[in-house]
Image (cartoon, coloured by chain):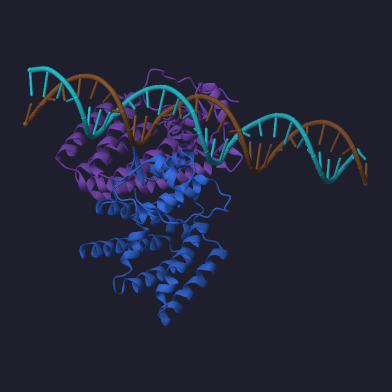
Chain colours: A blue, B purple, C brown, D cyan
Amino acid sequence: MPEGPVIWKDEELSPIRDKVYEYLKQAIVQGIYKSGDRIVEREVAGQLNVSRTPIREALFRLESQGFVKTLPRRGVVVSKLSPEEIVEIFTILSATESLAMKLAAQRAEEPQRDKLRQIIAEIEEALEHNVLREEHWRIHFKINAVVFEAARSPRLQAMIDSLSEYVQAFVHLAYELPGRLRKAMEEHRDLARAVMEGEADLAENLTKIHVENAKKAYLEVLAKE
Amino acid sequence: MPEGPVIWKDEELSPIRDKVYEYLKQAIVQGIYKSGDRIVEREVAGQLNVSRTPIREALFRLESQGFVKTLPRRGVVVSKLSPEEIVEIFTILSATESLAMKLAAQRAEEPQRDKLRQIIAEIEEALEHNVLREEHWRIHFKINAVVFEAARSPRLQAMIDSLSEYVQAFVHLAYELPGRLRKAMEEHRDLARAVMEGEADLAENLTKIHVENAKKAYLEVLAKE
DNA sequence: TTACTCCATAGTGTATACGAAATGCCAGCC
DNA sequence: GGCTGGCATTTCGTATACACTATGGAGTAA
């Protein structure tokens, strides 16, 4: 019975199932629940002091996203995030994210282009002053937001978000490799520029390369262990 | 309060939530529940003579797949399947399915190649004897099965299945266009051959073209109404 | 000693009860 | 006559109770 992270905000008014969902997802990606661990509804319900109902609802969502799988009449177990699984997700991300970038390049309007221009300037700034670690995630999320705004494809966005959540922890690891962070920033800059200038095919290809590089970095980190 | 299709098999032992899920999904794609209709848990529970619990569980799954969306404290409404949404799904399918085909071409082993050879022969047969309508779906699913077996990417498969279920009804419509059915069969044949021969890039491109053609056919049908 | 059977227990599957929030209607007031 | 406030109703959100199934261990017989 693993102890979970303490991320409980009592005063929030969002449905309990959402909080449970976040709680369990974090526990899984942080490795507190390990692959193959059983998740017993009553146990979690007891730990969080809620009933089984919201637990079940959260588990169903986690199942539909692939974090756990339920065996009929047996309960749910944490899916294994084997290296093969991670690589598979990188592969799918490569296809879906490059599509998103292509769409963004095709559909970006002036407001989005403007935001991209600003982001590019911020990246240059960060590269120059070497404050990469501080700025990287902020810029990453900022680019994502603009790209999704431009691509106008909420379903695609949801798919990518869901896949990204999986590999997020591993991507973090990969940025520990010397030089990877700077390279990733440069890739982001070039990508943002391509989207801004409406170069759809270029944006698509740069994204494929970017994700491919992330995958390689992950495999390198993996090999070192 | 729309009346649903009668597809209730009492004696099955699969969980009720799965049956409710299928029931509601069919009702949505068949247009019995229309875009924007509210789905009230108690009503459905009453119609099917089960409690609200499995209904809720089915609704959560439908939500995570995008068939419905739930407004907090307001209940769930059927998502709109506007033409733009359909086109968006075709676009995503183009990217994901072409990835699946590429992987299949790269990873197919002798057993899968053998099955593909057989399928190609069946297509030729069907084209010659002009029994396209009878054979098309059987062959479609057969190809899919082999390709997924070859691609070895269950997550990708799940994503494609989920997306396909949406547009299935519309693809059906599109095959009413004169000549589309034969063309689609020929595309399937060429695609199967490319996968069989390990021509990954060719398979990828043929898939993109195939899905693109399906999208165009859908838009044509749409324009006629 | 081993294998088979039976029972206790754990844990999911479903039903139902209760509470809270939002909407719509009706009445009363301005 | 129109607007506002409150009440009733609807419907979701959560808790809980009961049922059913699978599993593991103990006990007995070969």
Residue A72 seen anywhere in this rendered image of the structure = no
Which residue is more in the foreground, A91 or B102? A91
Which residue does the image show at 24% across and 27% down from the upper left? B125
Which residue does the image show at 26% across and 51% down from the upper left? A82
Which residue is more in the foreground, B177 or A75? A75
Q: In which quarter of the image is residue B214?
A: top left
Residue A183 seen anywhere in this rendered image of the structure = yes
Q: Position of residue A105 (x, y in %)?
A: 47, 61
Q: In this view, does D1 lie to the left or right of B60?
A: right
Q: Where is residue A8 in the image (x, y as percent from the top left)?
A: 49, 54
Q: In which quarter of the image is residue A114?
A: bottom right
Which residue does the image show at 48% across and 66% down from the upper left? A196
When the figure is inspected, residue A103 is found, relative to residue C10, above or below; the finding is: below
When the figure is inspected, residue A92 is found, relative to residue B182, above or below; the finding is: below
Q: Where is residue B157 in the image (x, y as percent from the top left)?
A: 33, 42
Quadrant of the rendering where the C terminus of chain A is positioned: bottom left
Q: In this view, does B53 lie to the left or right of B126?
A: right
Q: Is residue A150 left or right of residue A75?
A: right
Which residue is more in the foreground, C8 or B50? C8
Image label count: 0
When the figure is inspected, residue B90 is found, relative to residue B57, above or below; the finding is: below
Q: Where is residue B95 in the image (x, y as percent from the top left)?
A: 37, 49
